[in-house]
Structure formats: C-alpha cells, structure tokens
Amino acid sequence: MNLNDIITQLPYSKPFLFVDELLHVDENSISGTYTFDENLDFYKGHFKDNPVTPGVILTETMAQIGLVCMGIHLLNNNLEKDTVIAFTSADMQFLKPVYPKEKVTVSSQKIYFRFGKLKCDVVMKNETGQEVCKGILAGMITTRL
C-alpha cells in the first residue's frame, strides 16, 4: 500500500490539512509528520508578536494523522464517498509550545477498533524528540444518513 493514497483520501484540504507525510502504518500503529507554515492565519492573532500554535490545532493535527489516517488504513484504504470519520473525544496534555516553522512527528497506537469506533493513544514530538503533547483520541467511522 502506498502511504500517499491514505493522504489523498483525507476529507481535508489546505489550509486545514495538517499531514505532510506518513512514515509508517500497520494494523496497530501509524506515524506521520507536519511542518507548521508560518503563514497560517491563526498565527496572526494567537499571541501577536510571539506566535504559538493553538492547542486545538495541535489536537487536530494529532487527530488527522493518528486517528483519521489510521481509520482509512483500517478500512483497507477504501473511504467511501459518504463515509464520515467523526472526532468524538480527546483527553490531552500540552507539555511544550509549538512555534511556526516547527516540524512535528505524530505517533499513534491503536487501543481498539470495533463497531466503527476507533480509540488511539497519540503522541506528538518536536524535531529534538521532545514530547510536546499527548493524549487519548477517539472517533467514530460511519456513513451519512
């Protein structure tokens, strides 16, 4: 399987796509990277003159790589047109700030996937290998009614 095939099936586009590349995927884990472009709109107002990536964006990045990409893989890389991967919960810890131009690596371990529900233990690290945030993310894979 080509890891880029998973990225092309993501239901996001720029400026709300927070996946640059996937490094690894199997039935129990996934990892990928994203570099925060300094021109992203939220940096203009989030701590002006000293921009920091908002926690909600860090959570979204972790969810896109660690939950949605994993879900697409678990669906055998076959995301149907009417399939929805809904983010349902997050229990996050934020440990260090992430600044514009920083590249992060997200690693996710599947806790369970059953009855369309996916739960993962996800960690984000900066380029020096320090954990910047971590948490348990959950989502539901379903179809539109």
Image (spheres, helix red, strand yellow):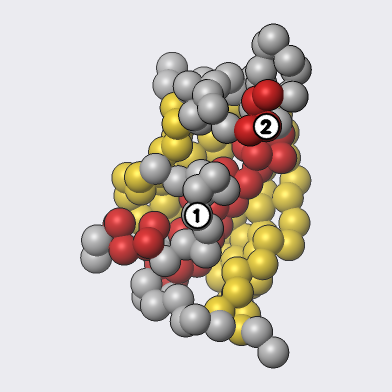
Residue occupying image coordinates x 48% and y 40%:
106
Of the pair 32 and 113, the residue shown nearer to us: 32
Q: Position of residue 27 (x, y in %)?
A: 40, 64
Q: Which mark is residue 13?
A: 1
On-image quarter of the C terminus: bottom right
Q: Is residue 76 above or below residue 103?
A: below
Please say whether residue 20 is visible from this viewpoint: yes
Give residue 82's position: percent from left, percent from top: 56, 83
Q: Whole-Å distance between the Cαs marked 1 and 2?
A: 16 Å
Determine whether 107 is above or below 40 in the image: below
Tell me the element at label 1: loop
Residue on which the image places disc 2:
42
Residue 47: x %, y % from top left: 75, 17
User: Which of 16 and 142 lies nearest the eye of the viewer?
Assistant: 16
Three-letter amino acid code at the position of disc 1: Ser
Figure label count: 2
Crowding at dot 1, Cα within 10 Å, few <14 / some 14-19 / many 20+, comes out as few
The amino acid type found where label 2 is placed reads Phe
Left-right relation of 116 to 109: right
Give x and y (percent) for residue 38.
Answer: 53, 24
- The correct choice, above or below, for 35 with respect to 66 in the image is above
Q: Residue lying furthest top in this view?
A: 49
Sooner in the amino-acid sequence: mark 1 or mark 2: 1
Outermost residue toward the left in this view: 1
Q: Residue at x 30, y 56 (%)?
A: 4
Mark 2 burial class by Cα count in 10 Å: few <14, some 14-19, many 20+ = some
Please state if 58 lies on the left or on the right of 128 as rendered: right
User: Residue at the spot x=52%, y=64% of the render?
Assistant: 11
